[in-house]
């Protein structure tokens, strides 16, 4: 009995981690957001390359970050310093960590989902995801009161160096990756998390109402 209880607790943690990593995966690969921001933020005004060339280089950057076998970062239209390249290698490690978490937690997550449905205990999802829905609200509030500070703190937590402080003279790629774009990425991520958490909360509430009937 205790062993099953611990397995379920671990599975609950895995479910949360899976949903978070899945939301990250969607966000970092959602290229239409960047295409939108190219126009919305007038990014082309900050560079001399065309929109087609910009799209190509952005695609090459994502391909490098997503492909564990690609260890060579090459953006033909954007020269890069050693520090700038080093930062993207650090980002690539975070990408790989996210994918590892997602793949390692997917099976326990589906096991828990199937187990709760089989035992008609979906109601157990209500409280955890009710609390979980407060997380995006909390971080959204921090972003609202000062995204600059939020952005800096994020980098201080996840990176052990200052390579992320790009110099536009040596790393012009930073001109086409403005801070506002990353703010939109965070907004998309928190919206996705809220939707995922609400979906499981709603599933639990709906199941509870049906069982009462």
Image (cartoon, rainbow, N blue to C red):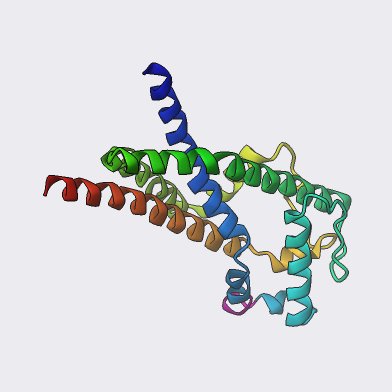
Q: Does the magenta segment cover residue 24?
A: no
The residue drawn where x is 88% and y is 69% is: 76
Q: Does the magenta segment cover residue 39?
A: yes
Image position of 3 with respect to 107: above or below: above
| Relative horizontal placement of residue 174, taking residue 191 as reference (left or right) | right
Q: Nearer the viewer, residue 130 or 87?
A: 130
| Relative horizontal placement of residue 58, taking residue 14 as reference (left or right) | right
Q: Is residue 148 visible?
A: no
Kindly give the residue lying farthest to the left in the view shown: 213
The magenta stretch is 38-42
| Relative horizontal placement of residue 90, taking residue 5 as reference (left or right) | right
Kindly give the residue lying farthest to the top in the view shown: 2
Image position of 61 with respect to 19: above or below: below
Classified by dominant secondary structure, the portion drawn in magenta counts as helix
Which x, y percent locates residue 23?
Answer: 52, 54
Kindly give the residue lying farthest to the front in the view shown: 118
Q: Nearer the viewer, residue 19 or 105?
A: 105
Q: Is residue 2 visible?
A: yes
- Is the N terminus in the top left, top right, bottom left or bottom right quadrant? top left
The residue drawn where x is 46% and y is 34% is: 11
Image position of 114 with respect to 35: above or below: above
Q: Nearer the viewer, residue 195 or 164?
A: 195
The residue drawn where x is 34% and y is 39% is: 116
How many labels were placed on the picture?
A: 0
Quadrant position of residue 9:
top left
Which x, y percent locates residue 28?
Answer: 62, 58
Which x, y percent locates residue 61?
Answer: 76, 62
Quadrant position of residue 112:
top left
Which x, y percent locates residue 55?
Answer: 73, 75
| Relative horizontal placement of residue 102, taking residue 143 as reference (left or right) | right
């Amino acid at each position: 009995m205790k062993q099953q209880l611990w397995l379920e607790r671990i599975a609950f943690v895995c479910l949360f981690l899976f949903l978070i990593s899945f939301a990250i995966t969607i966000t970092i690969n959602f290229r239409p957001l960047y295409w939108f921001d190219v126009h919305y933020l007038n990014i082309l005004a900050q560079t001399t390359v065309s929109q087609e060339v910009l799209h190509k280089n952005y695609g090459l950057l994502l391909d490098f970050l997503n492909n564990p076998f690609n260890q060579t970062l090459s953006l033909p239209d954007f020269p890069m310093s050693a520090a700038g390249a080093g930062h993207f290698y650090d980002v690539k490690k975070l990408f790989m960590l996210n994918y590892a978490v997602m793949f390692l937690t997917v099976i326990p997550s589906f096991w828990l989902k199937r187990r709760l449905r089989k035992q008609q205990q979906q109601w157990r999802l209500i409280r955890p995801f009710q609390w979980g829905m407060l997380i995006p609200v909390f971080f959204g509030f921090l972003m609202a009161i000062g995204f600059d500070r939020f952005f800096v703190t994020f980098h201080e937590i996840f990176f052990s160096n200052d390579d992320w402080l790009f110099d536009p003279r040596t790393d012009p790629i930073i001109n086409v990756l403005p801070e506002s774009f990353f703010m939109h990425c965070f907004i998309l991520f928190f919206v996705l998390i809220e939707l995922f958490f609400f979906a499981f909360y709603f599933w639990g509430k709906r199941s509870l109402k049906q069982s009462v009937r």
